[in-house]
Image (cartoon, grey):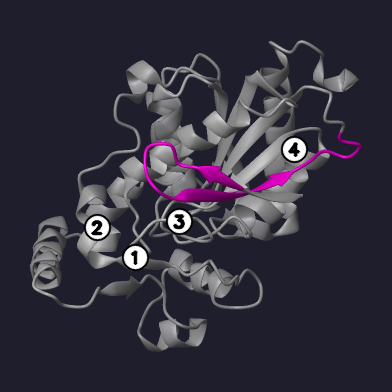
């Protein structure tokens, strides 16, 4: 693995990324590549990199797991901005970087997104035609979440809070950063939180199971408005034509990835699309638990092999 800094050509900061290489990597060969995108509030060292990135690299792909702008080890100020438009642009900058690498076949670039990264991956693929195949793991539509449970089903109320905070900051107030999760599962339960996604997210991000220094799960309040009007699936009926594989667990929770997975499979214009349901498993089980992750990879690996080898100059199996 190698850590790199990608220049954001439109702005003034870099994007930090880890490149995971296949066994026996030889720089003179051409490899298919997969862009791996982390969940909301996560980082490249968590499920997008150390689980799915490593697993797909072992199967012959060059995998690049990146930190979103304003988050993780990537640049951008102020910190903890979750702006969907900028998140989608990150994919383009990562693709720009990949096509400069001599060992990457520019005609064989795919994308894999986990949770909110899945929604961003879908949105990016609609207008980034260098992406040839799209896979998601419990992909979630962040805009829908912000209009729904993340705003307490009160998006107008949240917009009013954002407006008031921006006014305060314009007059010199400090930034207000929201913690997206409780400090512990016990604290969540004491606060009366019972939803499976909230409790399991807390278990993943707030314990050694998945905790990483850059996986902070924080959001800058004054910059949340852009997400409330955004829709990851807008124009999917017209623009999402790449082969699509959507993996979900069948234990639904408040974050809605099961519902979103069903919706995008119905709406996508893709001629080849498949919904994979990991029966008996939840959203966060698919982040790192070996059995559901194995179920997902059993479908994703041949999916990417098929669609990223189709235009290969050298067949994937021969590399």
Q: Residue at x 47, y 18 (%)?
A: 270
Tell me: 255 left or right of 284. Answer: left
Q: Mark 3 vs mark 1: which is more N-terminal?
A: 3
Bin the neighbour count of mark 1 within 10 Å (Cα to Cα): few under 14, some 14-19, many 20 and up: many
Q: Dot 3 lies on which element?
A: loop
Task: Judge depth for marks 4 and 1 and give the one in front.
Answer: 1
Whether tag 3 and tag 2 are in contact, CB under 8 A, the answer is: no
Whether tag 2 and tag 1 are in contact, CB under 8 A, the answer is: yes
Viewer-proximal residue among 78 and 251: 78
Q: Dot 2 lies on which element?
A: loop
Bin the neighbour count of mark 4 within 10 Å (Cα to Cα): few under 14, some 14-19, many 20 and up: few
The correct choice, above or below, for 6 with respect to 309 in the image is below
Q: Dot 4 lies on which element?
A: helix
Q: Residue at x 25, y 42 (%)?
A: 230
Residue to which mark 4 is pinned: 298
The correct choice, above or below, for 115 with respect to 236 in the image is below
Q: Residue at x 43, y 51 (%)?
A: 69
Residue to which mark 1 is pinned: 219
Residue 265: x %, y % from top left: 45, 29
Boundaries of the magenta span: 5-25
Q: Dot 1 lies on which element?
A: strand
Viewer-proximal residue among 162 and 144: 162
Q: Is residue 20 highlighted in magenta?
A: yes
Name the residue furthest front: 12
């Amino acid at each position: 693995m190698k850590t790199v800094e990608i220049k954001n050509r439109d702005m003034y900061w870099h994007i930090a990324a880890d490149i995971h290489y296949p066994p026996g990597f030889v720089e003179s060969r051409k490899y298919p590549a997969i862009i791996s995108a982390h969940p909301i509030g996560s980082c490249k060292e968590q499920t997008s990199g150390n689980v799915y990135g490593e697993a797909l690299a072992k199967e012959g792909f060059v995998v690049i797991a990146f930190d979103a702008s304003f988050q993780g080890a990537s640049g951008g100020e102020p910190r903890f901005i979750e702006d969907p438009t900028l998140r989608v642009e990150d994919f383009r900058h990562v693709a720009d970087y990949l096509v400069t690498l001599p060992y990457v076949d520019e005609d064989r670039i795919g994308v894999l997104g986990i949770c909110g990264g899945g929604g961003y991956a879908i949105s990016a693929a609609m207008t980034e035609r260098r992406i040839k195949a799209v896979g998601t793991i419990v992909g979630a539509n962040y805009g829908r979440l912000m209009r729904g449970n993340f705003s307490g089903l009160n998006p107008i109320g949240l917009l009013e809070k954002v407006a008031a905070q921006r006014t305060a900051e314009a007059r010199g107030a400090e930034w207000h950063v929201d913690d997206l999760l409780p400090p512990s599962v016990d604290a969540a339960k004491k606060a009366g939180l019972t939803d499976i996604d909230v409790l399991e997210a807390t278990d993943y991000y707030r314990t050694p199971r998945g905790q990483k220094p850059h996986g902070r799960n924080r959001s800058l309040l004054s910059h949340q408005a852009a997400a409330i009007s955004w829709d990851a699936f807008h124009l999917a009926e017209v623009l999402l034509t790449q082969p699509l594989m959507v993996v979900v667990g069948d234990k639904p929770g408040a974050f809605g990835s099961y519902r979103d997975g069903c919706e995008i499979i119905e709406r996508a214009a893709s001629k080849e699309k498949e919904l994979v349901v990991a029966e008996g498993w939840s959203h966060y089980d698919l982040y790192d638990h070996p059995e559901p992750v194995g179920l997902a990879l059993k479908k994703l690996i041949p999916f990417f092999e098929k669609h990223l080898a189709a235009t290969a100059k050298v067949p994937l199996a021969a590399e």
